[in-house]
Amino acid sequence: MTLGWLGLSQWLKSRPSSYFWGDLLFGFTWTWLAGSIYWGWFRWEPFLHLPIESLGLPFTLWCLAKQHGKVGNWFYLGSLFGTVMTDLYFYVVNLIPHWRQLMQIEPSQAQSILQSAVAQIQTPWGAGWAIFLISILLTVGCLPMRSQQLHWRTFGGAVLSTLLVDGLFWLAASSV
């Protein structure tokens, strides 16, 4: 699918009326590719998550230095920032063992692991870190929304989407 996203992004970028959407889709393609590699082949090893999710970082920084593809590249950076915050939470609250266990079992066996992880999240330590990192995500996500420049707003939106995605995962884990 990555090649499909890439092809569609290039086609959209070739047309002035849809350039923005193509640029945004190009940034999403980096996120998609890295996520596909990690979740497809390496999901059982949390220590590889950030290095693999960062695969597009050198290219993104090069493009931004050349003032090329600001919207898509800032979207990728916002998504990556959100991933860093989520992973930081997993490390600090010691959820990594749960992550490893969940990636190596059948879904029918997940309930007790998820319940244990949620119990750890609901401790004062887990709740305090959640509040702290949510505050960072809200600040880093909302401040760029004041800008009139689309690439900053895209960055902010990508960061804020972390709260939505992580919130959905938390709801799913809590309902088991």
Image (cartoon, grey):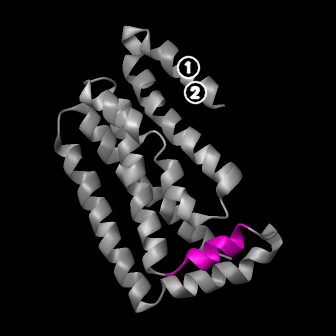
Residue 101 image-quadrant placement: bottom right
Q: Is residue 163 above or below residue 57?
A: below
Furthest-left residue in view?
A: 147
Q: Residue at x 70, y 71 (%)?
A: 102
Q: Residue at x 27, y 40 (%)?
A: 153
| Foreground of the two, 39 or 155 | 39
Residue of label 1: 8
| Foreground of the two, 31 or 19 | 31
Residue range of the region highlighted in magenta in the rendering = 94-103
Question: Can you give x and y, in whole percent of width and height, for residue 29 in the image?
Answer: 52, 33
Question: Can you give x and y, in whole percent of width and height, for residue 18 in the image?
Answer: 41, 16
Magenta-highlighted stretch: main secondary structure? helix
State the quadrant of the C terminus.
bottom right
Determine whether the residue tagged by mark 1 lies in a helix, strand or loop. Answer: helix
Q: Is residue 162 above or below residue 152?
A: below
Residue 110 image-quadrant placement: bottom right
Residue 173 visible in image: yes
Q: Is residue 46 left or right of residue 166?
A: right
Residue of label 2: 5
Determine whether the residue tagged by mark 2 lies in a helix, strand or loop. Answer: helix
- Is residue 102 part of the magenta span, yes or no? yes
The reply to whether dot 2 and dot 1 touch (C-beta < 8 Å) is yes
Looking at the rendered structure, the kind of residue marked 1 is Leu
Looking at the rendered structure, the kind of residue marked 2 is Trp
Residue 174 visible in image: no
Total labels: the figure holds 2
